[in-house]
Amino acid sequence: MTKNNKTSSTNLVDLKLAVIKFHNANVYTETNIARDACFTSHNSLDFKAKQMADVAAEIKDLMPQRGSEVADVRIEKLLTRYDSMEMELYDLSIRHEADLEVYKQITGETWSARPRRTHKSSGLGLDERLAKFA
């Protein structure tokens, strides 16, 4: 696993800011670009964590079969894959930290993920209104 240092993180933040500033946009557009980057990098972290949990579950399921050649080969492949995913997760976390810093520099606020909606919109309420006629 590579080690992050302050210089490389600062460079990444500077590069991301330069990309946003390149567009010569207004504050509203810059804020949206920075928010989108935070949202995307956050979702990437979540997705990678779920993938890693799935691989870990496969490894756990194969543990009772250790000693058989087929299971051992499969476990070794899964462990190699998991190790690679750990490095990806580390890189994704650096990316997300940089996105958070850029958002903070542009807006002065700390970005946080909003929870997904747990209810469905009734839209215009047409279904309820049309139910009277059914």
Image: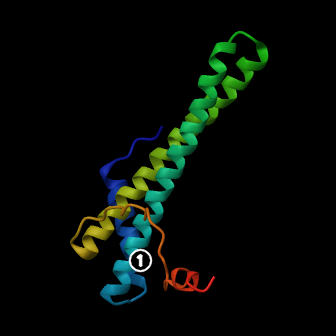
Q: How is the image coloured?
A: rainbow
Q: Can residue 11 be seen in this view?
A: no
Q: Going by the picture, which residue comes out furthest to the right? A: 70
**Residue 125 vs residue 76, the one in the foreground:** 125
Q: What residue is drawn where x is 30% and y is 86%? A: 27
Q: Is residue 119 above or below residue 21?
A: above
Q: Where is residue 113 in the image (x, y as percent from the top left)?
A: 36, 61
Q: Which residue lies furthest to the front in this view?
A: 133
Where 62 falls versus 112 (above or below)? above
- Residue linked to disc 1: 33
Who is closer to the viewer here, 20 or 15? 20
User: Residue 103 lies in what quarter of the image?
Assistant: bottom left
Residue 17 in view in this figure: yes
Judge by depth and name the residue closer to the eye, 73 or 11: 73
Please indicate whether residue 31 sits to the left or right of residue 37 in the image. left
Dot 1, crowdedness within 10 Å: few (<14), some or many (≥20)? some
Residue at 39 percent of width and 62 percent of height: 12
- SS category of the residue bearing label 1: helix
- Tell me the kind of residue under disc 1: Ile
Residue 19, percent from left and from top = 43, 76
Identity of the residue drawn at 53% across and 48% down: 48
**134 in relation to 102, above or below:** below
